[in-house]
Image (cartoon, rainbow, N blue to C red):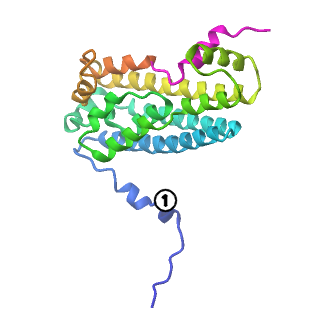
């Protein structure tokens, strides 16, 4: 006789028992639980952002610009929400973190595969980061795939080309973007604004993250210092986590969209 089918409940649908079993502390430090929860939440938001950005790219490939812009706005909101979780981490005092920080080495947020996927999908493709995932074939393969696949920017340039706008090289592409930015209210203009808003929000995430790190550990080397050195062995040395994070603040996913604004004039 078959067992009766249990009705779907909130807990079963969301797998709440499994979810709540994943916060395994390595110490008795009070603040370690909030540290784990916040970072797990980050990864969930990154998962959703990747899903929405991938779908936005598909809409771009189909010339469904308003739908692409809508999902870009959603991705922006996801990143803003993730950034707001840094407020919780900032309630942790330096000495609270020191209670369990040594137990984390060599684990570090630098090793977040999903954040690197977000960067690569957004057009910030830097193969040096793969050096830190060579010991995990699954993560390495996922990032290698992201390096090889078209980015959001590639999909956007494809839209411009199909619309007959010059986009064969950077000077002609910049000229096309200036023209689009002057077309207030057009589909392409709204899409450009959605891309810039997303790019700005990612930059704000970096800045808030830097401030949080400075507030909690000051200029100490990060727990992932060895990973930073491994990734950028052919570049300058980063003596602290803060110095590396500060250098990332100038990153832009769509630099030509920012540059084009310099040359927009009123009729």
Residue 118 pos. (x, y %): 46, 35
- Write down the quadrant of residue 229 in the picture: top left
Task: Give the vertical position of 37 relative to 124 (above or below).
Answer: below
Query: Which of 99/196 is in front?
Result: 196
Residue placed under numbered mark 1 in the picture: 14
- Asked whether residue 265 is drawn in magenta, I would say yes
- Asked whether residue 237 is drawn in magenta, I would say no
Q: Residue furthest right?
A: 267
Query: Which of 16/113 is in front?
Result: 113
Q: Which residues are magenta?
A: 251-267
Is 115 on the left or on the right of 231, as rendered?
right
Q: Quick check: can you spot residue 39? A: no
Is 1 on the left or on the right of 21, as rendered?
right
Is 85 on the left or on the right of 220, as rendered?
right
Query: Which of 209/130 is in front?
Result: 130
Q: Quick check: can you spot residue 34? A: yes
Q: Report the residue at 32% width, 20% height from top.
A: 244
- Write down the quadrant of residue 238 in the picture: top left
- Write down the quadrant of residue 211 in the picture: top left
Residue 170 pos. (x, y %): 56, 16
Task: Give the vertical position of 35 relative to 208 (above or below).
Answer: below
Q: Report the residue at 37% width, 38% height from top.
A: 144
Query: Which of 183/5 is in front?
Result: 183
Q: Report the residue at 36% width, 21% height from top.
A: 245
Q: Disc 1 on helix, strand or loop?
A: helix
Residue 173 pos. (x, y %): 61, 18
Q: Report the residue at 23% width, 45% height from top.
A: 28
- Quadrant for the N terminus, please: bottom left
Number of on-image labels: 1
- Quadrant for the C terminus, please: top right
Residue 109 pos. (x, y %): 33, 34
Q: Residues within 10 Å of mark 1 (few under 14, many from 20)?
A: few
């Amino acid at each position: 006789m078959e067992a009766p089918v249990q009705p779907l409940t909130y807990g079963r649908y969301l797998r709440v028992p499994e979810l709540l079993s994943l916060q395994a502390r390595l110490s008795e430090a009070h603040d370690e639980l909030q540290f784990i929860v916040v970072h797990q939440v980050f990864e969930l938001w990154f998962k959703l952002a990747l899903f929405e950005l991938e779908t936005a790219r598909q809409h771009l490939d189909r010339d469904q610009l308003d739908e692409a812009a809508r999902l870009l706005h959603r991705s922006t909101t996801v990143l803003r929400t993730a950034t707001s979780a840094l407020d919780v981490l900032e309630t942790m005092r330096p000495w609270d973190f020191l209670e369990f920080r040594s137990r984390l080495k060599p684990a570090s947020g630098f090793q977040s595969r999903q954040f690197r996927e977000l960067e690569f999908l957004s057009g910030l493709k830097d193969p040096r980061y793969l050096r830190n995932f060579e010991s995990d074939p699954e993560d390495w393969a996922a990032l290698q795939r992201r390096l090889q696949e078209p980015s959001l920017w590639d999909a956007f340039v494809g839209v411009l080309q199909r619309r007959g706008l010059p986009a064969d090289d950077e000077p002609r592409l910049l000229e096309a973007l200036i023209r689009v930015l002057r077309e207030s209210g057009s589909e392409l203009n709204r899409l450009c604004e959605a891309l810039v808003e997303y790019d700005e929000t990612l930059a704000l995430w970096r800045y808030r993250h830097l401030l949080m790190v400075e507030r909690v550990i000051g200029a100490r080397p990060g727990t992932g210092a060895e990973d930073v050195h491994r990734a950028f062995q052919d570049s300058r040395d980063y003596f602290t986590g803060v110095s590396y994070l500060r250098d990332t603040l100038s990153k832009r996913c769509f630099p030509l969209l920012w540059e084009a604004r310099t040359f927009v004039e009123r009729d």
